[in-house]
Image (cartoon, rainbow, N blue to C red):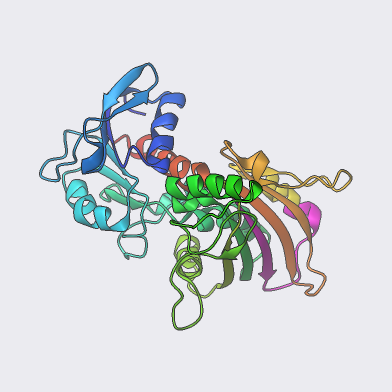
Amino acid sequence: MSSGLSVGVVGATGAVGNEILGLLLHRGWPILKLVAFGSSRSIGRPIKFGSKELAIENFDSDHNHGLDILFFATDSEVSRRFAVKSASLSTLVIDNSSAFRMEPDVPLVIPEINLGVVRPDQWLIANPNCSTIILLMAVAPLRALGRIRRILVSTYQSASGAGRDAMVELEESTRAYLNGEVFEPKVMPHPYAFNIFSHNSEIDESGYNGEEVKMILETRKILGDAEILVNPTCVRVPVLRSHSESITVEFEGPAPRIDEVRRVLSEFSGVRVVDDRERSYFPMPIDANGGGDVLVGRIRQDASNPNAISLFACGDQLLKGAALNAVQIAEGLFDRFGL
């Protein structure tokens, strides 16, 4: 990686932006200049970066602040307004929103899977949806064992995917529930404590919600397979920050042996196999929290289909599902192109 990088984080005060700052520090990025950008209500607010204190600045799209790389950890509206202009100024832009994920000329990247699709002249890179990242980290290695025809996936998604306010609401509603107090949800559409409900994204005319549609389309783009069949069911569960997914993978021919599945998963960077049948110890959100690996276990033949295997995966939504994947994209491109 180049020495003396100039880096900006748009949305630095949010859950993902804050994680990006932490990763830049703990992964030892050689930072010459770091600028933290926030909304108008955050301007001037101090934010910690190691022993230093940064003041939140306003993002001005008319110039790129002389930055080598700019992380957008904002909503799609902000990204649409500013990301393309920033990338046009030869600043490497990694956008965590859904604004550009399905644009044909914008790479949608999970570094361990498809970093090679990025060309040297592409300055805008999209970070995939968190659920898609966790799914494909568990599924992509299995392509070495045969062509995948179909993926069935049910997600158990944490509060962090809806932002810091949703995490606070989960904590506050849980305390209220345990104290026998009435709590009126403000962030989520339904009571969150001790409850499960369909993912809080809009349902389309087909009956799928927005999160499920993202998983279908993004999986096809990242794997470069327009014919792969994906059927997701996405729900929110009362967990703070790690997503879990129950996954069944159907191959075109007979399913591979379980020992081969374990082997290719254990050899894949960013995956950790947690599959202890004797102790009944498998991936859990509490173990995924704060870690960079996607945990994969419950590996077994599908009892209903000789061509399929089933497994269970957990990953930290704020890290590999968002901030860490974005930082890894940047690291991979700096190493590959020497930007």
Q: Nearer the viewer, residue 119 or 124?
A: 124
Tell me the quadrant of the picture where the C terminus can be found: top left
Does residue 160 appear anywhere in the picture? yes
Looking at the image, residue 65 sits to the left or right of residue 110; the answer is: left
Image location of residue 116, percent across then percent down:
42, 50
Q: Position of residue 319 (x, y in %)?
A: 50, 41
Up/down of 222 relative to 322, above or below = below
- Residue 305 found in image quarter: bottom right
- Quarter of the figure that contains the N terminus: top left
Q: Is residue 201 above or below residue 315?
A: below
Who's the residue at 29% across and 47% down the image?
120
Taking the image as shown, residue 254 lies to the left or right of residue 224, namely: right
Residue ranking furthest to the right: 278
In the foreground, 43 or 144: 43
Residue at point 12%, 41% (across, down): 63
* Among the 4 quarters of the image, the one containing residue 171: top right
Which residues, given as a range, are shown in magenta? 243-261
Between residue 106 and residue 166, name the one nearer to us. 166
- Residue 82: x and y in percent read 20, 51
Give the image location of residue 43, x and y in percent: 21, 35
Q: Against 240, is 1 above or below? A: above
Query: Residue reaching furthest top?
Result: 51
Residue 74 colored in magenta in the image:
no
Indicate whether residue 251 is drawn in magenta: yes
